[in-house]
Amino acid sequence: MDVFEQFARAGLEWQGLSADDTDVAVMRYIDEVFGPELRALMTVDMHGLWPETDFDPSRAPSS
Amino acid sequence: MSHPQDLALRDQAAGIAAGELDPGELLQATLERIAERNGPLNAIVATFPEDSERMLAEAPQGPLHSVPFAVKDQFQIPFRAPRDGTHSEAAPPGDSGVFRRLREAGAVLVGVTNMHYRGGGSTGVQSAYGPVGNPWNAEHVGGGSSGGSASAVGARMVATAVGADGGGSIRLPAAYCGVVGLKPTFGAVPVDGNLHGFYDLDALGPFARDADDGRLAAEALMGTELPPGDASNLRVGIPRFFWEDLDPDVEHGCKAALGAAGWATEDVAVEGQEHARIATALNLAIQIMPEWPLDDVDELDPVTRAYTKFSALIPAAALARAHRVRSQLRRSLAELFGRVDLLAVPTVPAPAPTIADPTVHLPSGPHPPDRANVRQTGLANLTGVPGINVPAGLHPSGLPVGLQLIGPWDGEARLLDAAKHIEQATSREFVDAVPQAYL
């Protein structure tokens, strides 16, 4: 069992959910598809990149 | 006389207002057209002739007086519980903002349209009612999640239908089915009675056969006038990032349409664009979680089940980072719209894949459809700005090609002007094209 499978099974078990082999295989595929962009997002330097304090997608940002 | 559903939405409305088109005959002909064409497409999942006839008898005077329309199966309506692409009733019958607005405009609801299961996909393949087919080739997908609405308009069962767009779910099926699809600015159409919890992504809007019909339907849904203007001298930004890795014929068709428009163009970059796709996917996955059936997740099909479980493992820090990306994208767009009037990108990177194998094939290789498609559309959802699909060509496969125009906040009128300009510049070749099956 590799790190991904350990994480998937343990994380779901902690939430009261099970994962069969099909679940793990499909989740592994999803991770292969979206994982590189997710990890890039998690590691990009965001210092100085502040979220809007009055976020409202119905209008242009005010800050 | 041609079939009344071959008339434009505006011509149906004008014909009724002038006493030249009998609304009872229009309703009956519409129901017959649905019965005739819906089978291979599976676009409309319910009709209710007696309720439609009652609506017609009581139709208020308005710009769409007595004109038929359809709504996606994620909105409450008074005489049928929405299913949201599932087997079960997701909410009781009731009122919704889109139903109320079109009712106030005088329109008559004739059907509920099929959709991707819980709005969670861009193909329309997964639905309790079966896959949505494409009017240009029923073996290909109609798109998602509002695929039934796009397919019904493309097959001329109705002249307008309503959809919802949380990550591209109006624009993507519109491109696949060769119709106009408008995602308005976030919040421009009331969301009450909309089942989905995409609380700051989802915008509700119309499908129509061309920009003028789209304007008429959008005005009714938004409850405001969208005055037409001149779009012959626009400045259009081309964000090259979204023009990479495209089916060559899609790229060619979109470039040809832009060339025909004759607009001044300049290459631009949206700051944060490289994170837009994952930020969209994260927000879609997390925002829908409260409505997602974790209790009975094991009842779902294997792919949906695994996506649901995967979503439960997403780290919270990722969403916080995605939120910062949204602000970065919004600030960058605000700056860009000081220099250009619109952005232009292909709506979908490749034509509609087959229902049997909805893999999208791009120069870089095969891709899952949602990943490939959301790259093109998520930007407008993350930032709240409006976007529109404009039919822009026909692929050698015979399937439609769509060009997406993205405007500034509250820029719907400009988008519709620009869409009409492209229609005129291409001699209406692609909005007036009729699928081979209906010739």
Image (cartoon, helix red, strand yellow):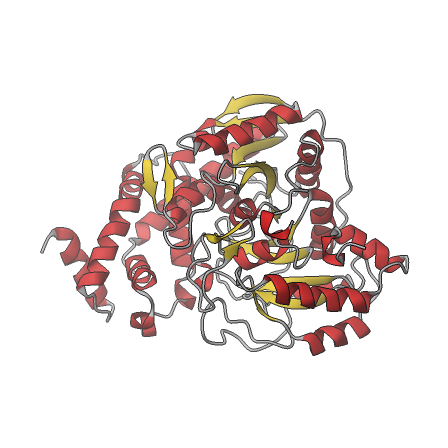
Q: Nearer the viewer, residue B25 or B276?
A: B25
- Of all residues, the one furthest to the right in this rendering is B18
The image position of residue B40, as x and y in percent, is 52, 61
The image position of residue B223, as x and y in percent, is 73, 55
The image position of residue B138, as x and y in percent, is 50, 54
Residue drawn at point x = 63 percent, y = 72 percent: B47
Q: Quadrant of residue A11?
A: bottom left
Q: Nearer the viewer, residue B227 or B147?
A: B147
Q: Quadrant of residue A1?
A: bottom left
**Left or right: B145, with B99 as reference point:** left
- The answer, for residue B135, to whether it is visible in the render is yes
The image position of residue B331, as x and y in percent, is 51, 35
Residue drawn at point x = 52 percent, y = 75 percent: B91
**Left or right: B145, with B217 as reference point:** left
Q: Nearer the viewer, residue B26 or B344?
A: B26
Judge whether B52 appears above or below B350 on screen.
Answer: below
- Of all residues, the one furthest to the left in this rendering is A1
Residue drawn at point x = 45 percent, y = 70 percent: B86
Judge whether B361 appears above or below B252 on screen.
Answer: below
- The answer, for residue B270, to whether it is visible in the render is no
**Left or right: A13, with B13 as reference point:** left
Look at the image and tell me in which quarter the N terminus of chain B lies.
bottom right
